[in-house]
Amino acid sequence: MAHEWALWLPEQALKTLRYGGFYTVEIQPGLRVVSLNMNFCARENFWLMVNSTDPANQLQWLVHVLQASEDRGEKVHVIGHIPPGLCLGSWSWNYYHIINRYESTVTGQFFGHTHMDEFQMFYDEETRTRPLGVAFIAPSVTTYVNLNPGYRIYYVDGNYKNSTRLVLDHETYILNLTEANHNLESPGNPEQNPKWSLLYRATEAYGLSSLFPSDYDKLLGIFISDDRTFQKFWYLRHKGHVSESCREACKTAMLCFLRSGRSDELDLCDHLNGFAGNLARAARKTLC
């Protein structure tokens, strides 16, 4: 892999790539990208039974990178495959703690894996009410499972002095398979040059001025009070292909997923839905 990527990455990045599949690169003055190897947090990785806290010392390396970026006044975008909220608990909680510590440095987090169009929130660990980060989960180009192909374009605060480098907006494009497979000129034969089309622009779809963490925190409140907006999100989450609405237990579970970028966070669901601790206690009693 390092051999194939040598045209794009400097030698120092290739060194850590060879060691553990993670690296960092300065994209432009003031902006650095950190690419994490999320196999080191995957629940399906049985090797993590040996060490699930920090395999290959990746998180320790991340702290060193972020500290150096903080010292230099750089902003950092983190990219990876599996969203941290779906990782093994110990790794996920440590990553959450790191994002809390370097909230002014990490201004973008970008993941995939679920094939859906989603996000997960990061809050301060002391009060768990102040939004400080968003993990954007982009839709997949693959159709798995029963989905249209999709891709995401992010609009980020630009390259100028003291830029926040925060995500300002994003657009999601899809390839409508129903239309592509319904070729009027040649029934039974798929369209040979299918058209990608804009599904939605986030600020327009949800009536937001930007996509800062505070905006997404407000959006979660809107999802609770305005079911029509939540059902729109549910439709867009599936890239324009969903057969049924999401209500009651489905909606509660989805809100809990969106609310926390930290694995197995039951207490935040209580706080969000007003169960006064009963939901977490009942779940823990059942699970234990």
Image (spheres, grey):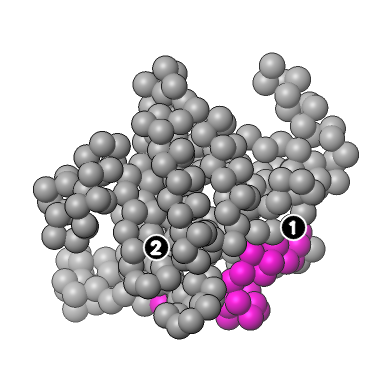
Q: Residue at x 19, y 61 (%)?
A: 8
Extreme-right residue of the structure? 276
Q: Relative to 214, does residue 246 appear above or below in the rendering?
A: above
Instruction: Inspect the image, locate mark 1, and give the three-letter code of the amino acid beneath it.
Output: Arg
Sequence order check: which comes first, mark 2 or mark 1? 2
Residue 208 falls within the magenta-colored stretch? yes
Q: Position of residue 282 (x, y in %)?
A: 79, 26
Q: Specify the segment rendered in magenta.
A: 198-224
Is 133 or 69 nearer to us in this picture?
A: 69
Is 163 or 283 nearer to us in this picture?
A: 163
Q: Relative to 207, does residue 106 appear above or below in the rendering?
A: above
Label number found at residue 130: 1
Q: Residue at x 69, y 67 (%)?
A: 214
Extreme-front residue of the structure? 71
**At numbered mark 2, what does the secondary structure look like: helix, strand or loop?**
strand
**Residue tagged by mark 2?**
32
Q: Residue at x 67, y 21 (%)?
A: 287
Give yes or no for contact between labels 2 and 1 (Cβ–Cβ under 8 Å). no
Using the rendered image of the protein, determine whether residue 3 is visible from the camera's viewpoint: yes
| The C terminus - image quarter | top right
